[in-house]
Image (spheres, helix red, strand yellow):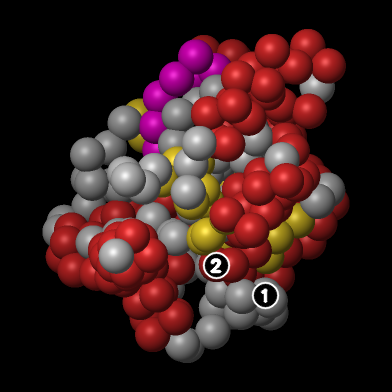
Amino acid sequence: EVKKFAWIHGSIEAFLAENQAHYRNNHCEQLSHADKIIAISKKTRESIETVYPMFNDKIQTIYNGYDFTSLLEKSEEVAPVTLEKNSICVIGRLEELKGTDRVLEVFNKLQQELTDVHLYYIGSGEQENFLKEEVERLQLQNKVHFLGYQKNPYSILKQAKVLLSLSKQEGFSGAVVEAVTLGIPFVSTNVGGALELSNEGQFGQVIDSNQEAIDSLKNYITGEKRISEQYSEFIQQFTIEKQLQQIEELFQLSKEERS
């Protein structure tokens, strides 16, 4: 008998909406045939438990793996741009789902309180023109910078004071992993991976409101709050090796169950 594993890469609370009943039932039917359902973050796991409580005993969490050696090597390359000293970085597509418009709202309020602060968008997307127009309207051209898509964002991110992510949904936030790897703290909405990577505020802050985001950014920029020195040891639990080891254990277990 062949064992079946289902991998879920994002939060699925949206399936609870009335107009999603058809998708929810289809998905439920498929998951009922799986021996194990793999979630890639706590947030993903909680969403599966909420939508399909009947599958709780089949769910297992296996985090996405990252190649930190290559990431750290790339961060040592010469950066295409030198950031201002009090810089906030945002990495990812410029679109509504990533909350890039909310980032500008938060930054606009923050720079009224902290004058010497800069925002760098790394990425491109459908909100780009809208954001550039907003920046002009708010007269923030000297403080908000658009760097477009960057093949190697790590050499830029390494210079930042803090990473900001106000995404509405993530399976497991890659940008947040990258920041912690480079010893840069983060401020993030409660998306997949953010709570684990924050580790109770040691490596970053998970926020609910714009005001919380502003306060957390202020703390990191003024140096009132810093990332814990243990970041390099902590991040090792998210290596590709660790992910493969868990997948192998999963296959091994299902082999033993079959025999």
Relative to 129, residue 74 above or below: below
Residue 198 lies, in percent from the top left, at 61, 69
Look at 81% across and 51% down and name the residue there: 208
Viewer-nearest of discs 2 and 1: 2
Asked whether, in this view, residue 25 is left or right of residue 118, the answer is right
The residue that mark 1 highlights is 201
Quarter of the figure that contains the N terminus:
top left
Q: Which residues are magenta?
A: 121-128
Q: Is residue 122 magenta?
A: yes
Q: Residues within 10 Å of mark 1 (few under 14, many from 20)?
A: some
Asked whether, in this view, residue 251 is left or right of residue 135, the answer is left
Relative to 123, residue 224 above or below: below
The residue that mark 2 highlights is 197
Relative to 240, residue 95 above or below: above
Look at 45% across and 20% down and name the residue there: 125
* Secondary structure category for the residue under label 2: helix
